[in-house]
Amino acid sequence: MKRTSGVQVYLLAIVLIGWTGLFLLDAWPVRAALLIISAAAGWAAHRLELSRQREQADLDAMQREQQHHASILQVVNRLRHDWLNDLQLLFGYIQLKKYEQLQPFMEKLKVKIQQEGYVSKLGIPSLIAFLITFRVQSRSLQLEVGLDQEVNLQQLPVSAELISSLVRDTVELFREHSGSDLTGSGVLSLEFDAGDDHLLIDFVYQGSYEREALERAIHSRLSSSPAYGLETSDFQEEEAVIALRLPFHT
């Protein structure tokens, strides 16, 4: 690509010299020759620029694909690691004959499997990918999705893109303003509640956070619009509650 850029410089220099000669020379044959040379050099420079742009676009696409694959691999490895930990703990209880620990552990494991199943069936691929990836990659904020039953958001009469963008933006706001202390990272709970004519998206954060900064950011970036409203915004010490109301299309 550097070689292409160098050739372009030479071609543009030829174009500049040719156009300069058109104004300085009086001989029409020479001026015509310079015009032809300049036009040819300009066309060649244009084609080289298009080629350079295509090469850069292909390179950017390849880098994005590699990053996407790396992200998927990270998610798979993290999920595999978590399940291996659960299995090792289960086998440990059995080997140590701590049978009294098996029932509560299996109930906890059942809830975990159920919740992961609910998340995978939310119906909006971009939202599902974000929630799973965030839970795996985030270190400063622990995200928990609480669902009592299966909810297919794609089937609701409300914009799927709006739901996905509001969840992403709000979660990122909490991550930006959450604080880490000796007790560990903060915990953000996310719930979806579909009513008769609206969808409520509830966020409950527990842990240390920049209270005033988060409150300003929430009211600035999530101010009500015709598409949704800020139903609840309560900011207390070590806890913040946000609820977004999305009316159904009529």
Image (tube, rainbow, N blue to C red):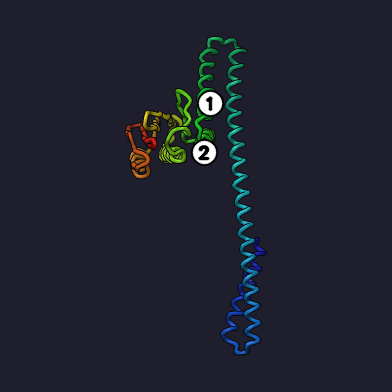
Give residue 39's position: percent from left, percent from top. 62, 75
Q: Is residue 48 visible?
A: yes
Image quadrant in which the N terminus is located: bottom right
Q: Is residue 234 left or right of residue 115?
A: left
Q: Secondary structure at mark 1?
A: helix
Mark seen at residue 202: none
Query: Does residue 42 appear left or right of residue 226 in this picture?
Result: right
In the displayed structure image, the side of residue 159 where residue 109 appears, left or right: right
Quadrant for the C terminus, please.
Answer: top left
Q: Is residue 45 above or below residue 188?
A: below
Mark 1–mark 2 Cα distance, whole angstroms, equals 16 Å
For the point 44% across and 33% down, the residue is 156
Residue 102 image point, x, y percent: 55, 13
Q: Residue at x 43, y 31 (%)?
A: 188
Q: Residues within 10 Å of mark 2 (few under 14, many from 20)?
A: few
- Mark on residue 117? 1
Amino acid type shown at disc 2: Ser
Residue 219 or 124: which is nearer the viewer? 124
Task: Name the residue tied to disc 2.
Answer: 126
Indicate whether 7 appears above or below 37.
Answer: above
